Image: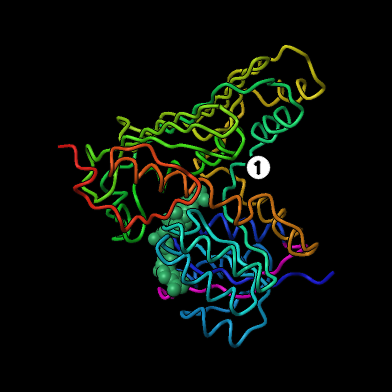
Amino acid sequence: MSKLRFALIGCGRISKNHIAAAIANQETMELAVVCDPVLENAEKKANDYFQATGVKPLVYADYKKALDEQKIDCCSIATESGYHAEIALYCIHHKKNVLVEKPMALNTADAEQMIREAKANGVTLGVCHQNRFNAPIQELHKALEDGRFGRLVNGTARILWNRTMPYYQQAPWRGTWAQDGGTLMNQCIHNIDLLQWSLGGEPDTIMAMTGNYLRDIEAEDFGSILIRFKNGAIGIVEGTACVYPKNLEETLSIFGATGAAVIGGLAVNRVETWNFETPAEQDERVAKLAGTDPKDVYGSGHNQLYANYINAVNTHTDPLVSGTEGIKAMKIILAAYKSQKTGQAVKFDGLSFSTLDMSSADVKVR
Ligand SMILES: NC(=O)c1ccc[n+]([C@@H]2O[C@H](COP(=O)([O-])OP(=O)(O)OC[C@H]3O[C@@H](n4cnc5c(N)ncnc54)[C@H](O)[C@@H]3O)[C@@H](O)[C@H]2O)c1
């Protein structure tokens, strides 16, 4: 099978994980093009890839020109969140497969359109929730699939991180309603995805209280969410960018009648608790994983996420994090925003909401 030709659109901070994933998957893909209007960003990424593979991607400022001039199979989109939907839809309409960074969009209408049009154009849409590939999370999911938890009662996603003003000042889009959202939409979305994936994926009702306490940004720097799932289980989210003085933990806890698991560490990668009524073959593997933790909070899941995505494109199957999966955490957060704005519980089904429906007055606490 010939290698899939990728274009990377957006060469900022997270692009290093995309370059690493492209290098790790060089047997099945080739990074043909890198695009960024800031050409030096794109040039640097092209050189990083060249040094590892001996192949230099072409550098473009304009992704539309790149798609016109080069044969591209797949587009990876890693621009500011507010551009994801527009760029993804352009690529989809040009029959390109799309792997988009989280959040896939900033409103329900755009995300639903991306899913619809990817299907209509026969291309594969994937979303970068790479933490699903963390080894302890894969084991947790296997335990859930094998029914080891029994009846699920509750789960908690805690994201106790720190993002200081210099972080937000790195780029003007950070913390804005038009381009980003707050800590729930930017930092906490991964663990919210894991929570919904673990507890059954079909939310019913969402209630939230969020606030902007310490950071001089438009959106929230703290968020708490209660999610009632259709299967009755309750998910609890505690997400903050305000922990003094640095990142403390990102933890997912899942509790059922016959099982309890807590995966923590800096970025849901360390097994803290693994208790089940009935022993299973996976327990030995899990015991070996205990104590491991990733070097940085993004983890290394992009490598496996790309491998899974490439396989999905080649076999015309859904990737693990398809558009239909990727929309769920984004929609839970939009429901939480609506709940904060209205003071009401919000139904997940039929939700229509945008970060642009929020204003700083909706979250200002001081
Ligand atoms: N999966 C993760 O763990 C993870 C981690 C960090 C960031 N992200 C997501 O990745 C995205 C980018 O974040 P970042 O921190 O790298 O931001 P960044 O500001 O560092 O980089 C964004 C880059 O996109 C470029 N860009 C803007 N418009 C473009 C266009 N039309 N064509 C090509 N390039 C364009 C910008 O010039 C910039 O270089 C965000 O959506 C963010 O939420 C995901």
Above or below — where is 102 with respect to 196? below
- Secondary structure, mark 1, is helix
Queried whether the magenta region covers residue 242, the answer comes back as no
Asked where in the image residue 136 lies, by quadrant, the reply is top right
Other-residue count near label 1 (Cα within 10 Å), few / some / many at <14 / 14–19 / ≥20 = many
- Which residue is at a point 55% across and 65% down the rendered structure image? 114
Instruction: Look at the image and tell me in which quarter the N terminus lies.
Output: bottom right
Q: Position of residue 297 (x, y in %)?
A: 49, 40
45 left or right of 365?
Answer: right
Above or below — where is 191 with respect to 75? above
Q: Position of residue 227 (x, y in %)?
A: 47, 33
Q: How many marks?
A: 1
Asked where in the image residue 54 lies, by quadrant, the reply is bottom right
Given residues 268 and 319, the one toward you in this image is 319
Given residues 99 and 232, the one toward you in this image is 232
Above or below — where is 143 with respect to 183? above
Asked if residue 278 shows in the view, the reply is yes
Q: Which residue is mark 1?
A: 133
116 left or right of 345?
Answer: right
- Which residue is at a point 73% across and 22% down the rendered structure image? 148
The residue stretch that appears in magenta: 26-40
Ligand 1, seen in the image, is in the quarter at bottom left
Given residues 258 and 38, the one toward you in this image is 258
Above or below — where is 213 with respect to 309? above
Amino acid marked by disc 1: Phe
- Which residue is at a point 80% across and 19% down the rendered structure image? 280
Given residues 147 and 312, the one toward you in this image is 147
